[in-house]
Amino acid sequence: MPIQQKRQAPVISFETGQIWEMGESSLRIGLIGKTLVHYKHYKGAAPRASVSLANKGELTQFLIKNKAVLSQGQPQTVRR
């Protein structure tokens, strides 16, 4: 019996200011920590959205599940 290997999810590198487009909605990456990401999920043409917090792995799975595409905008650089 051949051994089946598990497929790993593609690695998505998050950067501040990235905008991911998903059909009728978009998601903008805010602050990025060691394991957590602050983001805003805009639905439709609404100009406002609340800030959400998610684990990097969970957010990656959410983007893959919703077939998100990274828009061509330039991410912002954060100086510390």
Image: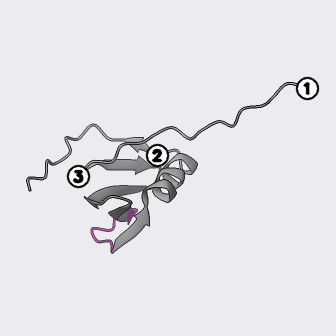
Residue 68 placed where, x, y %?
46, 46
Classify 10 Å Cα crowding around label 1: few (below 14), some (14-19), many (20 and above).
Answer: few
| Chain part drawn in magenta | 42-50
Query: Label 3: which residue?
Result: 17
Q: Quadrant of residue 25?
A: bottom left
Q: Main secondary structure of the magenta part?
A: loop
Question: Of callouts 2 and 1, which one flags the residue occurring earlier in the amino acid sequence?
Answer: 1
Quadrant including the N terminus: top right
Query: Label 2: which residue?
Result: 68
Find numbered disc 1 in the image and state the secondary structure of the residue it sits on: loop
Left or right of 73 in this view: 54: right
Q: CA distance from mark 2 to mark 1?
A: 37 Å
Residue 62 to residue 2: above or below: below
* Disc number for residue 33: none
Q: Please name the amino acid that badge 1 sits on.
A: Met
Residue 2 placed where, x, y %?
85, 24
Q: Residue at x 54, y 52 (%)?
A: 61
Find numbered disc 3 in the image and state the secondary structure of the residue it sits on: loop
Left or right of 63 in this view: 3: right
Question: Of callouts 1 and 3, which one flags the residue occurring earlier in the amino acid sequence?
Answer: 1
* Disc number for residue 1: 1
Quadrant including the C terminus: bottom left
Left or right of 66 in this view: 11: left
Question: Relative to the observer, which residue lies in front, 15 or 6?
Answer: 6
